[in-house]
Image (spheres, rainbow, N blue to C red):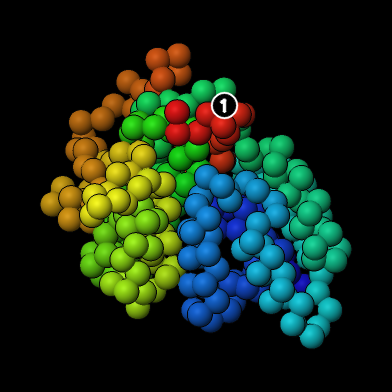
Amino acid sequence: LICGPIFPHEVVGFSGGHKYLFPGIAAPQIINFTHWLGALITNPVINGTRNTPVRAAIEAAADMVPVERSLIGYVVEGHEARGAFAGPVREAWQAATELSEQLQIVYQEKPYHTVLSCAPRMYDDIWTAGKCMYKLEPVVADGGTLIIYAPHIDEVSYSHGRVLDQVGYHVRDYFVKQWDRFKDFPWGVLAHSTHVKGVGRYEGGKESPRVNVVLATRIPEERCRRINLGYMDPDSINPADYAGREDEGVLYLPKAGEILYRLRDMSKFGK
């Protein structure tokens, strides 16, 4: 019996279902494979999409598990369960994603040049608070700035900080076009790196990210620059200054990381 929540996800499209087996309780090899596959496709393409190549890989792996499986999948809004779906894994997961799509994806008519994405305290490092970028990237305008505001965070990653200090945060093609240099690092860490940095280009040795990602945390400025992210002093930010300014192209999210924001017309993405 598999039991867990279903919500939009940057690697697989929607979490849950057989994802709780692969990569849920699987070994690093399949964790790294699925996360890097998702990173190659990119977060804006995958997040909130039901049928993805990563989901297909997970389902193919699940077909090799020789036991009967059932799912209780639930969709949560705030602190309340809004729906629970039980039955064969694929059917229950499909039904749950339909409710998740209604409740956990917010559509916007136009992108924003500035987004203040506030990380709740349940995210205690950038490894987890990266969701504040994943869930907002689709509504940041080309050349815009997304600020991860988290005065309580003082660490990049408690588990993978040493690796991230070595590789930094970069767009996908920075790694792909220098694969011999990076192929032996954990692919799941590379995936996190490029998900936080966002989509962009790497041509002629020059990296051009689409979005300027800035950390307003207790992580020192020197370390932020070293890992290739921007820095703002969190004490210089008054979140109220960003509120109610959507008409000016400024979006304020007081609790980011759970709800996916997308453009209603994704052909405007990057404009």
Residue 254 visible somewhere in the drawing: no
From the viewer's perspective, is residue 26 above or below residue 188? below
On the picture, is 166 further left or further right than 24?
Answer: left
Q: Residue at x 86, y 63 (%)?
A: 87
Q: Quadrant of the C terminus?
A: top left
Q: Position of residue 86 (x, y in %)?
A: 84, 60
Q: Residue at x 64, y 40 (%)?
A: 104
Residue 249 visible somewhere in the drawing: yes
**Which residue is outermost to the front?**
204
Q: Position of residue 19 (x, y in %)?
A: 65, 67
On the picture, is 66 further left or further right than 215?
Answer: right
**Which residue is outermost to the top?**
247
Instruction: Check disc 1 and report its element: helix, strand or loop.
Output: strand
**Which residue is outermost to the left?**
222
* Amino acid marked by disc 1: Gln
Which residue position is annotated with label 1?
Answer: 108
From the viewer's perspective, is residue 262 above or below residue 199? above
Q: Quadrant of the N terminus?
A: bottom right
Q: Nearer the viewer, residue 231 or 191?
A: 191
Q: Position of residue 85 (x, y in %)?
A: 81, 55
On the picture, is 206 further left or further right than 106?
Answer: left
**Which residue is outermost to the right?**
87
Q: Residue at x 42, y 70 (%)?
A: 187
Q: Position of residue 152 (x, y in %)?
A: 31, 48
Q: How many numbered marks have been drawn onto this rendered protein structure?
A: 1
Residue 247's image quarter? top left
Q: Residue at x 53, y 55 (%)?
A: 41
Q: Nearer the viewer, residue 13 or 151?
A: 13
Q: Residues within 10 Å of mark 1 (few under 14, many from 20)?
A: some
